[in-house]
Amino acid sequence: MYSGPSIYCFVVIITVFQPLRFLLPWKEGATDRKRMASEEESAVKEPLDLIRLSLDERIYVKLRSDRELRGKLHAYDQHLNMILGDVEEIVTTVEIDDETYEEIVRATRRMVPFLFVRGDGVILVSPPLRTA
Amino acid sequence: MVIFFFPFPPFRLFFSYFKDLVGREVTVELKNDLAIRGTLHSVDQYLNIKLENTRVVDQDKHPHMLSVRNCFIRGSVVRYVQLPPDGVDIELLHDATRREARGG
């Protein structure tokens, strides 16, 4: 009779390699399926795919509290947590002069070499606006 | 330098990244504008952060934590984390992000 451990091996091998079946072109049309699968990977199906196209490119990020970032996108996830490199942060504040009651718009700039941004503060992501 | 990143349950990309950054100096900027510099001690799946040897960046503006040396920061109050530029291989980050984005 088969000993205990060898049955175990069978079960483990079957369950572990089950997902790899698609790699084996046993049936006709399997290579076509593989090609379609790799094409789908680069297809833009949902908004996050659009961001994927900007990986390793400079982007513009609008954040809450009137903040903006311009930097190179290195990583992101579905929460829009991001890692940006060579980032310029622009904070816009509006001050009201006590006497003249005029609004003073002030933009404070800051450079950070490598920054993790938490996704819950992100409003939008876009290729950089050509203003500079 | 760093070998990591096979977050098989998906959506663990930044958790893995921060786990590899443990021991490095980072500056955490909170949503209330408080900036804390310290050594990353640990992180969890919610990206809660434990920092050691902490000092507040702008001591005069935020005198609350002059005597605090270790702290636990809830992940949801973090706005930024300023990271060491030589923290991790950027190509590795890109590859892991492509994998992650596809799966999610």
Image (cartoon, coloured by chain):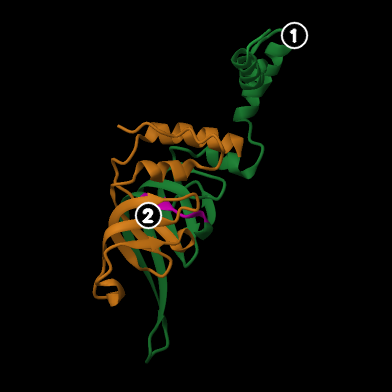
Chain colours: A green, B orange
Badge 2: residue crowd in 10 Å (few <14, some 14–19, many ≥20) = many
Tell me if A39 is positioned left or right of A62 in this view: right
Mark 2 chain? B
> Magenta stretch containing residue B18, yes or no?
no
* Image position of A101 with respect to A36: above or below: below
Q: How many marks can you see?
A: 2
Residue B25 seen: yes
Q: Where is residue A55? Give x, y as percent.
A: 47, 38
Q: Mark 1 points at which residue?
A: A27
Tell me if B54 is positioned left or right of A24 in this view: left
* Image position of B36 with respect to A23: above or below: below
Q: Where is residue A99? Give x, y as percent.
A: 37, 92
- Residue at left offset 61%, top offset 12%: A6
Q: Mark 2 points at which residue?
A: B81
Magenta-highlighted residues:
A115-119
* Residue with the most extreme bottom position: A99
Quarter of the figure with the C terminus of chain B = top right
- Seen from the viewer's position, the closer of residues A9 and A67 is A9
What is the secondary structure assignment of the residue under circle 1?
A: loop
Mark 1 chain? A
Q: How far apart are marks 2 and 1 (CA)?
A: 50 Å
> Mark 1: which amino acid?
Lys
Residue A129 seen: no
Q: Where is residue A63? Give x, y as percent.
A: 49, 60
Quarter of the image for residue A108 reads bottom left
Q: Where is residue A104? Give x, y as percent.
A: 39, 77
* Residue with the most extreme right position: A28
> Mark 2: which amino acid?
Val
Tell me if A44 is positioned left or right of A80 in this view: right
